[in-house]
Amino acid sequence: MKKIVILDFGAHETQFVARRLRENAVYCEVLPCNIKIATLWQGLNNAAGIVLAHPLRGKNAPDFDKKILEIKLPFLTVYFDDKKRGGRNVVNLPDMHSKTAAAELTNFARKTCGITDRWTGKEILAACVAEAKEQVGKEGRIICALSGGVDSTVVAALLSKAVGSRLNCIFVDTGLIRLGDKEKVIKVAKKLKFNLKVIEAEDLFLTRLAGVEDPEQKRKIIGATFIDVFEKEAKQFKNAQFLAQGTIYPDIVESLSPKGHVIKSHHNVGGLPERMNLKLVEPVKFLFKDEVRVLGRELGLSDDIVNAHPCPGPALGVRQLGALTKRDLDTLREADLIVREELTKAGWYNKCWQAFAILLPIRSTGIKNAKRTFEKPVCVRVINSVDAMTADWTRLPYEILEKISSRITSEVPGVNRVVYDITPKPPATIEWE
Ligand code: XMP
């Protein structure tokens, strides 16, 4: 597949250049400008053209520009501010979300570089299967930690297609998962016929977490316990050589950026490959989230998996604030399901990036059945985002909020108040802990 190579000079917008091209079915890859020239040549293998993505006030790396001129490929220099600049093949594209930006970039790829290949469902599937097969060769078991989220489920379904019974999936019920998560994973495993082992580890997690209030400490305990449980189970498979993980392209682009944007590496199984001497397999690492979803559909996954909102690795462990108890987690599970159900019924679930409930560690006075109550509040958080680096709260119609509030307070024992979080990110984060 012919591609465009985007050279990243540290611009925050580089990811959006890649997004605009991929959305228009042009395959592209991002390379940081500070790589060795040999790596650059390798990256240019199969390239039909180059986009140089310059930040607002970044250094222009003139030597590098000269090198590019020596490479006999069409190129386009993109700046992201409004300043008019002269020069050959230069465009100013301050708004990377605009139609103009998409049109300029796609024209460059299709007309100037002559790319006719289309990066769509079938091509994505074929490329990912080929990549996976190459990575795992002809022998050795592949272990996959399946969370039920779209990335790990797509990875499992893809590997199952690529290597069949050499794949073993492990789902850990940490006691922190949402209602329906486990059933969803079991159903998809049955449908796609892959080996799945479900581990019940609720007691272990809740024992280790008992009384722990600090969010960072909770996260560390959850991560470490996950690794312990997973490692113990995975060791029982003979000849396990690989660990499959759902790393996606934004993680890669961010971690390579010459500007060194903050990296959010949240993977559940981080730390395992070294500990267990396993090789990492990341078959969707060149895909953006929406492409992972396209691939999921191509693999026959159902809409409830493909369109599922992201859920953090520690799941409800960071949404029940403060020290965790089974009772409060059950309360939160019920409230969370109501939020998702009502949004789905109203046709809003797929219009937002993430929607969930948080159980707050305080109590307030209320009245139920003409009696005083002193119970916990549930906070509802619904946000829109492009990349989770920034987010805004969703202006939901009042009727939906009203329905969510009345269902939670009447159906969920222990909750007498519902509040809606109207804070963007920044200054808040999406999750509360
Ligand atoms: P924050 O709360 O940092 O979250 O604004 C940004 C996005 O990342 C998700 N998130 C996580 N995902 N493991 C994950 O896989 C984690 O530990 C984790 N913490 C936050 C969050 O849900 C949001 O989509």
Image (cartoon, rainbow, N blue to C red):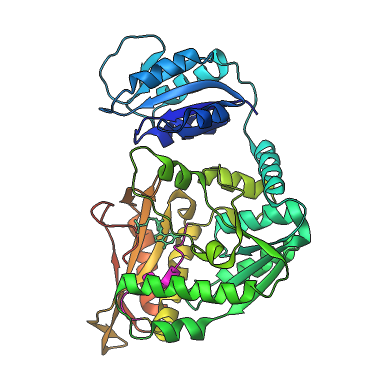
Q: Is residue 44 left or right of residue 131?
A: left
Q: Is the magenta region chiefly helix, strand or loop?
A: loop
Which image quarter has ligand 1? Answer: bottom left
| Front one among 162 and 31 | 31
Residue 319 visible, this orientation: no
Pick the quarter of the image with the N terminus: top right
Q: Is residue 75 left or right of residue 371?
A: right
Please report the residue visible at 63 percent of the width from the left and 69 percent of the height from the top. 170
Q: Position of residue 54 (x, y in %)?
A: 35, 26
Q: Quadrant of residue 327?
A: bottom left
Number of numbered discs: 0
| Front one among 243 and 333 | 243
Is 140 rendered above or below residue 201? above
Is 433 rendered above or below residue 307? below
Is 282 rendered above or below residue 238? above
Q: Position of residue 174 (x, y in %)?
A: 51, 76
Is 122 rendered above or below residue 318? above
Q: Position of residue 205 (x, y in %)?
A: 47, 81
Is 321 in the magenta?
Answer: yes
Give the magenta-colored segment's residue range: 310-323
Pick the quarter of the image with the C terminus: bottom left
Is 264 in the magenta?
Answer: no
